[in-house]
Structures are given as structure tokens and as C-alpha cells.
Image (spheres, helix red, strand yellow):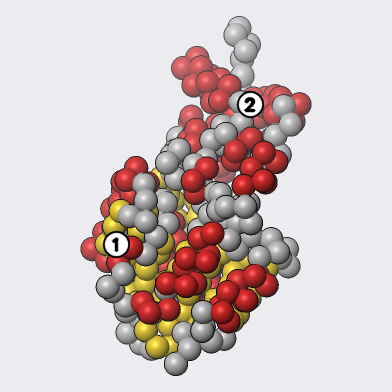
């Protein structure tokens, strides 16, 4: 790159080609997000200022980002944040990166809480990570409160920072501990979770972006991927108010097993919500009166 005049347009084209050769899935988008990060601009700026040259300092910073990305470090970890449900969340190596699939869970919970009683009460978010699920719910449901649990103190610190930056700290409580243990004496309108659900044998086949950089403890759930579901479905019923529900994001081909677990533990109606690709993505178990 040295000695050449690198404009935004020229740099984006070079990056797209380079990332494509490196086998990255979204080469153009990755380059745009990284360049926006370096320039501290919105993506629309790139297209309006295609001929803008970069300074030496900007080029050096961008080159450092490129090096990290071709080693499969996730873009969200390089830039330090990720958009989810139209909100901006800080993320780091202690948290899972929020994914579009999880918006299906949030939207399903919003619609079911909205159709319930006027006072929405308090929900619990188990394995909160960055706080993306519960803080999105609080943002879009002003009458809601939330309690969150995560086993990682580092993840809780990230979630607290996100709550503060979104102006939601006064409506959420944070607990460190194992699953439901820290809040077992509480009752909730709903319990929500995107727990680990990948079978141990599938880890080797994950994309290196995920396998090598995201917390494995937030991904893997025993030989069949159902370890955390078994605990939640068995224990959550006594903690949910009448007419309440347990909402869970699930992996591919896990809906039938979740429905069977619900029946085994005396839950009522089971709803299965598909994602935009038509794959079963969310299971909602309703409290049996």
C-alpha cells in the first residue's frame, strides 16, 4: 500500500478482492464496516466520498484491521460493537456476537408480552452475554423490567456497559451464577434464553471465526446439544407466573426434542417459531395452569 494514493473506492475494491481470496464469506461488507470504523463515519459516507484519499495514519490503522480479519477474527471483535434490533451493542471475546437469528426470539417475546396484561412485570434473561436480548426487550417495551444471569463476570461487565449506554440501567438487575440458581426464589412473567446448544462433536466443523474467537462455553451443550435445555425446562416452571412462558432459541432439528421435554415436565402449549429461512428457531413453552 505504501507510496500509492489510496482512495476509499480503490481501497474497498482491493479489500473485496483480498478477502475473497482469503475465503471470507462477506468480503465487501467486511471491508466497508472496517473502513467505517477507521474513518469514524457511517457507510453512506463511503459511497458519497469514493474519491477521498486516506491519510497515512488511516491506512496504517486499516491495514492492521485487515490483518486481523484475514486471521478470521470476527469483524465485531475488531470494531468492538455489533448492531442488533436496531441498537448498538459493545461486544468482546467474553460475549457471543449477537446474530440476526436471535432477533426472531426477541420479536416473538415482544409480540407475546404485548398481547398479555398491561403491566408487563419482569422477565429473566438466562446467559445474557452482551445483554442484547433483554436490553432490546426493555428498549421496545417501556413498561418491562428485567433480571439477567450469566456465569461470566466479564460478560456481565459488558452487559452493564450496554445497559448504561442505552439508558436502561434502572430497569435491569445483573446476577452472576449458574443458570437459574441466583434467582430461584423469584417469579417472572417470562424467562428467555439463548443458551449454548451446539453438540460437542460439531465444534470442529464450525467456522474459524466462531470456533477460534467466541467463548466455547457459550456455544457447547454436551453430546446432543440439549444439556442446558434440560435444566431450563425442568426448573423454570416454578419460577414463571400463570399465563407466562419460557422462550428459547434452538438449533437445527432441536424443536421436537424441546417439545418432548416440555410434555415430560408438565408444560402446556408449545409454540415453534421459524426463522426467515423456514428453519425452526424458537420454542415457546407456556405455563400450564
Quadrant of the image for the N terminus? Answer: top right
Q: Is residue 13 rendered to the left or right of residue 85?
A: right
Whether residue 201 is visible here, answered yes or no, is: yes
Image spot of residue 262 (x, y percent): 56, 78
- Residue furthest toward the top? 3
Instruction: Determine the image quadrant of residue 189.
Output: bottom left
Residue that badge 2 annotates: 70
Residue, disc 1: 182
As displayed, is residue 221 above or below residue 62? below
Where residue 61 appears, as percent x and y from the top left, is 49, 21
Q: Which mark is residue 253?
A: none
Q: Could you tell me which quadrant the C terminus lies in?
A: bottom left
Of the numbered discs 2 and 1, the one sitting upstream in the chain is 2
Residue drawn where x is 51% and y is 17% of the image = 60
Q: Which residue is depicted at the point 60% across and 71% down?
A: 258
* Residue at 54% from the left image edge and 49% from the top image edge: 219
Amino acid at each position: 500500500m505504501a507510496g500509492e494514493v489510496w482512495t476509499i473506492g480503490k481501497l474497498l475494491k482491493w479489500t473485496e478482492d483480498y478477502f475473497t481470496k482469503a475465503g471470507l464469506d462477506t468480503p465487501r461488507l467486511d471491508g466497508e464496516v472496517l473502513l467505517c470504523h477507521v474513518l469514524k463515519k457511517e457507510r453512506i459516507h463511503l459511497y458519497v466520498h469514493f474519491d477521498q484519499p486516506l491519510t497515512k495514519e488511516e491506512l496504517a490503522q486499516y491495514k492492521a484491521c485487515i490483518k486481523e480479519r484475514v486471521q478470521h477474527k470476527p469483524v465485531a471483535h475488531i470494531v468492538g460493537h455489533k448492531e442488533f434490533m436496531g441498537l448498538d451493542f459493545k461486544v468482546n471475546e467474553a460475549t457471543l456476537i449477537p446474530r440476526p437469528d436471535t432477533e426472531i426470539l426477541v420479536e416473538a417475546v415482544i409480540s407475546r408480552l404485548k398481547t398479555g396484561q398491561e403491566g408487563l412485570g419482569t422477565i429473566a434473561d438466562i446467559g445474557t452475554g452482551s445483554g442484547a436480548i433483554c436490553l432490546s426487550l426493555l428498549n421496545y417495551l417501556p413498561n418491562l423490567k428485567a433480571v439477567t444471569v450469566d456465569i461470566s463476570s466479564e460478560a456481565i461487565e459488558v452487559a452493564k456497559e450496554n445497559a448504561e449506554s442505552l439508558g436502561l440501567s434502572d430497569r435491569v438487575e445483573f446476577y452472576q451464577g449458574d443458570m437459574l440458581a441466583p434467582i430461584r426464589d423469584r417469579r417472572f412473567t417470562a424467562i428467555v434464553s439463548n443458551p449454548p446448544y451446539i453438540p460437542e462433536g460439531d465444534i470442529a466443523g464450525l467456522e474459524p471465526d466462531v470456533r477460534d474467537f467466541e467463548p466455547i462455553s457459550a456455544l457447547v451443550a454436551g453430546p446432543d446439544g440439549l444439556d442446558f435445555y434440560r435444566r431450563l425446562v425442568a426448573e423454570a416452571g416454578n419460577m414463571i407466573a400463570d399465563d407466562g412462558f419460557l422462550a428459547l432459541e434452538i438449533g437445527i432439528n432441536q424443536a421436537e426434542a424441546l417439545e418432548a421435554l416440555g410434555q415430560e415436565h408438565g408444560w402446556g402449549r408449545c409454540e415453534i417459531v421459524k426463522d426467515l429461512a423456514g428453519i425452526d428457531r424458537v420454542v415457546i413453552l407456556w405455563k400450564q395452569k
